[in-house]
Amino acid sequence: MRPLEIVTPIILVVYLLYPLTGKKRPPAVGILPAFALVVIATHAQVEGIRWQMIPLYIFAGVSLLISIPAFLRTQSGVDPAVRPPRVILSLSLLALSSALPILLPVPVIPSPSGPYQVGTRIYELTDMSRKEIYSSKDEARRFQIQVWYPADVSETDQRAPWMSNAEIYAPAIATYIDLPSFFLDHLALVNIPAFKESKVTPTDAGYPIILFSHGWNGFNAQNTGQALELASHGYVVVGVQHTYGAVVTVFDDGTLANNNPSALPSGAPEGDYERAAQKLSNQWAGDIGYSLEFLQGQNQDAISPFNESLDFSRIGVYGHSTGGGAAIQFCGIDSRCKALLGQDPFMRPVSFEILESGVSQPSFFMFSQVWADDFDSRNNKLFKPFYAKSTDSFGAVYIEGTAHYDFADLPLLSPLAPQLGLKGPINGRRVTVIVNDYLVSFFNLALKGIPTTLFDNQNQKYEEVKIKS
């Protein structure tokens, strides 16, 4: 709960419990319900209202109505009789009214640990050299990227939202994870520790570039915490939004592109499925490649915020799930990729040629325990020979107690995230620390040459991290 959301039930608890002290209720206590409504009005202006707080809003309003006669009697010298059962009932109702905002809080994206503040910008790209293969329209491939980067933040710069167009994204995400469409509407209230369109911090050497590819039915901001962490350590991070593979894409002109299930046809015969998956992976790899071409133009454009700020000799790519497969595919066919990291990489979209040859770039792979333990899965059977053929691997590990979405920001949505299938039993903050450490350390080593012992087989910094067999 946010600060003013916490203050409201505290005020009401004091009001309800005071009669049990046996003392005469002073006027200051008698007006506490009215003060609670003042706090709620302030909360509405400063923090923003949300549906999870409605029971508490109603409780505060009813408390005020009930308190008025009691307050008037007290002022006339008659102190209302104390009825413990009524107090207990009222406290129970208050607890129930407070449960929803506690169980569905406004998520807080952790502040990054690096020395740089972070700025962010969103761009819409159209690759005229490629046709859109997942739309019925005859049009070029159009998609979006979000860029996080080291920034010089001014006093007038505004905090960026976690997701732009949250009024569209939140219902789409809720529906995808089998929740009522309104359930995540409060995500529109989430701001992140990054600033909209802040000035890029000047650099002489140019910042290394890291591109992120999201999972199937994901979105480019699903790993914002990781993007912030990398950017705060001196990287320009590009989240690629894969149109028709993302849960939804909202273009600048208001056009919506919903996920196209036929692009990855669940239930199709194995051969048909993998041909479709590889077609998808090539499209996504094309998005990654064109994003680099766009950034190359920005780097050379005198009026671009990224003018002469990017180092194209140091490019890393990572992805989650289907995006992990797309990252492998891109690095297998494009020599611009100098480092590769996969988070639960989905191997079925990777071409047979790359599966058989592996990759030559420095690479590292992280798995959730759920995926790692499924020894007989098609994914693990494809990964094992690919990994054996990759010539510069820093290892493959899994994190005990994790599930597939522990690599994304989604576990931050609720303390009930494990029950909703959004994370494993491990503490979410602990996973964030572990994943961020490996992520930054890997790219620091592979792209900046900063030494670390984290990838030594005998390293035991995190007892939850195990070597994947």
Image (cartoon, rainbow, N blue to C red):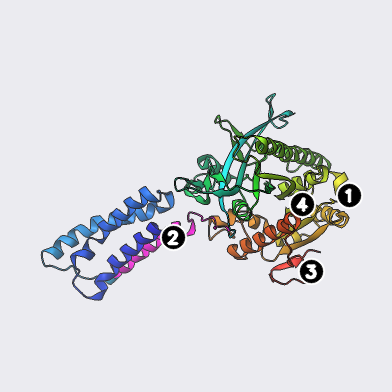
18 lies left or right of 334: left
**Amino acid at dot 1:** Ser
Quarter of the image with the N terminus is bottom left
**Amino acid at dot 2:** Ala
Mark linked to residue 203: none
Which numbered disc, 4 or 3, marks the residue that appears first in the sequence?
Answer: 4
Question: In this picture, which residue range is highlighted in magenta?
Answer: 85-112
Which numbered disc, 3 or 2, marks the residue that appears first in the sequence?
Answer: 2
Secondary element at tag 1 = helix
221 or 376, nearer to the observer: 221
Which residue is situated farthest in the bottom direction here?
22
Secondary element at tag 2 = helix
Which numbered disc, 4 or 1, marks the residue that appears first in the sequence?
Answer: 4
Which of label 4 and label 1 is nearer to you? 4
Q: Which residue is mark 1?
A: 357
240 or 369, nearer to the observer: 240
Q: Residue at x 43, y 52 (%)?
A: 52
Tell me where residue 99 sits by quadrant: bottom left
Whole-percent x, y for residue 449 in the image: 75, 58
Give the Cα separation between the discs numbered 4 and 1.
16 Å
Which numbered disc, 1 or 2, marks the residue that appears first in the sequence?
Answer: 2
Give the Cα separation between the discs numbered 4 and 3.
20 Å
Q: Which residue is mark 3?
A: 457
Which of label 4 and label 3 is nearer to you? 4
Give the Cα separation between the discs numbered 4 and 2.
45 Å
Q: Which residue is mark 2?
A: 99
Secondary element at tag 4 = strand
Which of label 3 and label 2 is nearer to you? 3
